[in-house]
Image (tube, rainbow, N blue to C red):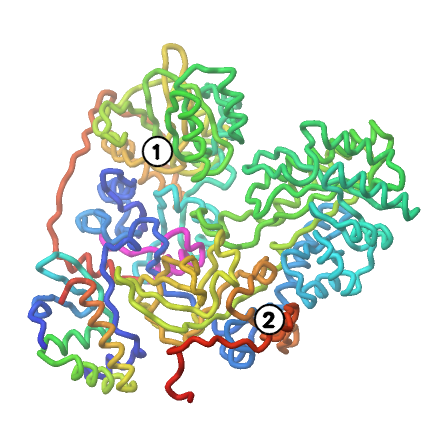
Amino acid sequence: MKQTKKLTRPYSKPSMVKLGGPLYAKHGAASNNSVPVRTSISKVPVSELAQKFGSPLFVFSEDAIRNAFTNYTEVFKRFYPKMVFGWSYKTNYLKAICAIFHEEGAIAEVVSDFEYEKARALGVPGEQIIFNGPYKPKAALKRAIEEGAVIHVDSMDEIYQIESIATEIKLTARVGLRVNMNTGVYPQWSRFGLNIESGQAMDAARRLAKAPGIDFEGIHCHIGTFMLSVQAYEIAAEKMANLFLEIESDTGIRLKYIDMGGGFPSKSHLKGVYQSPEVAVPNISEYAIAITSCLKRIFADSELPTLVLEAGRHLIDEAGFLITSVISRKLLPDARRAYVLDAGVNLLYTSTWYRPVFELDGDEGSFLEPAVLFGPLCMNIDVVDNSLMLPPLRVGKRLVLSPVGAYNVTQWMQFIQYRPAVVLVRKNGKVDLIRHKESLEAVENLEVLPEDLQQKQATVLGFKSRNVS
Amino acid sequence: MHVGISGMNATDNPGPGVPVARSLRESGAASRIIGLTYDAHDPGNYMDFMIDHVHRMPYPTKGWNALSEALAHVKKIHEIEAVIPCLDVELPLYIKHQNQLSELGIKTFLPTEDQFSLRSKEKLIKLCADIDIKYPETALVNSIDELQEFADQDPDWPIFVKGRYYKASAAYNLQDAVHKFIEISADWGLPILLQKPVSGIEINLVGLGDGEGGLCGSVAIKKLMTTSIGKIWTGVTIDHPALNDLAERFVSHTKWRGPFELECIQNSEDIFLIEINPRFPAWVYFATGVGINLPERLLRLMQGIDVGRTSEYPVGKYFVRYTYEIVTDINKFFKLASSV
Amino acid sequence: MTHSRLLQLATNDEGFCFDPRTGETYQLNDTARLVLTELKKGQSEDAAARTLAATYEIPLHEAETDTQEFMQMLRINGVI
């Protein structure tokens, strides 16, 4: 009788957890909930994905991407008639991902010559590219001018450089001015563009207005990243609108657009924010109302400028998942359970600031023990999470981390491990590989081994295998 | 009525749950009281003479899904009809989802999101102007540069360095203020408020708004002794017409819905509003003890029953908080620690 | 080897375990409870592992590894 009762629960490794330990502390990271289970991503079983494409594996959902974009653009269009949406390449510049956003109607927002080339190679016409960033090499500027891209200048020096290139090649450069300002948030992003309050932005605008070879089209700001303050956008929109009008009255040039950048948060859990994202993260319509109502108020008596936005994270983060597997287990000297995963900080750059949701690909019961998750790097800092409550897991058990769609597949690093494959679950349920797992050949492709160093072998005595004669 | 109440932490930094439960128990307004606890150690969990059953809840940081599942479970077992959330940290979640709670068949009586945001100090400054009450001279600063500018003009130390929602600490010089600025902004974000201390007598008021601008009772007190961490130890009821007026104006202007506490300072001429707490204070039983049972009135409001609005209570009643011990079986602790 | 300290541990049906000497409290899952019960009966680690394997129909080597790991937990927690 007793035996059958026990067997109604699946096998779980023997475990004992001390009560009143640090994880039981008030407001701790621990919960008395069972760990959420995710058996599929966009209806494709996690096990099938991992078996077919290996682990670790980044998985993106086409449906989620398109839905996010549609929802976001519809919200803004509801409040403002003249919208242009840019897709922030740096957030995730995999070709397939960018192609989806372009198909949905986004132009490309790039921040380097590399990203510029990527957008062009993908077939984006130059005039549908916004070229941002603090470093644009001369050749890239020249190409951007030739191809009619809008260049957002970051410094006075860049203005002079564009003037000279444009004069040299006898073309007109389309230029916008990147500005920064105090919007009441800390830290204030003052390193990009020219400052409004100190008058630098206006000085630059005067220069742009009369500069030879420059068509001054708009002003641009980007007040920060993962901005939880709606009010900051309202302040920024007001300062941008006033700058727009000041430029008109001072130089006689009426610009075409105001670019408010991006920085809209996703439903990710920023570390140090106690409340869950659904409470802490404002709805996108709150941002839309803050920005557009301010512009409509200030431009009540004149034509509305075009409003350009350059969101990234908000559109892609929740569409991305990382499947990872338990490689080995150990017990730490403080009795906490530790697991080594096949994905670590090499693939989860954002885990420094954000805490992903950890889901298991099957129910492992509700007996939870404090656990630490290590990555596969031989570096002490490779800790994916150091205070998670998990059921005892077996080797090979899979975890699904989300949201991880933003920045991870651009900021990941190739350190001692191959970077994994990336797949896209299509609308029709088909799974397309959109980036191969790296190979030795791919990684070493750019290396050159000088001839005289080829085929050298160590000749250390006494460090030989017994089996090799 | 079966009621769920949180804030079972009747410790030396007490939550309001146990006094709220006691108020409902003594009035007979609740036929069953379910303690919604976050920690198996919370003393309220063991007060079976006050709390009929106790349930462990997921921490608010886990979000709405976890909370709604847990509440649905408690509802199924104990048929709770109402919940009185008592802790600051869980209020954002409950307030945001009060409509869904009502769909689950769980009544609440909470402020709206707009009302709740009034406790942020920036909004409090405006509210004070609107309802014609003094607010201590305050500057909002967003950077250490601005703090420096403030210090350059007004070296009248000490000043209070305050977070938007929580935390305040006195700074005695610029260096001290910078240190506190960094510490508080790291926890609670910006802006930071720099406030001139107002000298005077601290007085407090607990009240209940009906959501339509009416005040359903209030009691004003003076804390006589506080513990080393600033919690009331002994206190006395007072009759302060200006404070009562303030409570009326506050409720009618904001149409405040639910319980609140006003923390004020009275100097020789004026009263200053220092803080609004959007919930019952832990000393709410003091009001019950002098005949103004606000938790009971809250339950009646939820049921749509017209409640008494009297705020007539004897002045000069004395409040003493004391400690008490329970000896029980460790199995009670085990059961709670293992419950999901 | 029997661990006389183990005999002192008080456990209940919900998997709670109380060490009367130190006052520490622990929570055990079903399998840990089973192994502990076997050990308290005076069974060897190997025998406890065999019972675990038979009860849950898992490979013996897995039960042995897991039992050994549980012994480490008991040791780290100062129970044996």
What x and y, as percent, mark residue B80?
33, 55
Residue A88 in view of the camera: yes
Disc ID at residue A422: 2
Instruction: Confirm whether residue A300 shows in the render.
Output: no
Give the image quarter of residue B168. top left
Q: Quadrant of the C terminus of chain A?
A: bottom left
- Residue A36 placed where, x, y %? 42, 66
Quarter of the N terminus of chain A within the rendering: bottom left
Left/right placement of residue A358 relative to residue C75 reads right
Magenta span includes B55: yes
User: Which residue is found at the position 11% from the left and 50% from the top?
Assistant: B327
Cβ atoms at labels 1 and 2 below 8 Å apart? no
User: Does dot 1 land on a helix, a strand or a loop?
Assistant: loop
Q: Secondary structure at mark 2?
A: strand
> With respect to residue A334, does B125 lie above or below?
above
Query: Image point 18% across, 59% down: which residue?
Result: C25
Asked if B174 appears above or below A224 in the picture, the reply is above
Tell me the chief SS of the magenta region.
Answer: helix
Splitting the image into 4 quarters, where does residue A394 fall? Answer: bottom left
Q: Residue furthest top?
A: B268
Per the rendering, the mark at residue B308 is 1
* Amino acid at dot 1: Gly
Mark 1 crowdedness (10 Å alpha carbons): few <14, some 14-19, many ≥20 = few
Asked if residue B312 lies left or right of residue A375, the reply is left
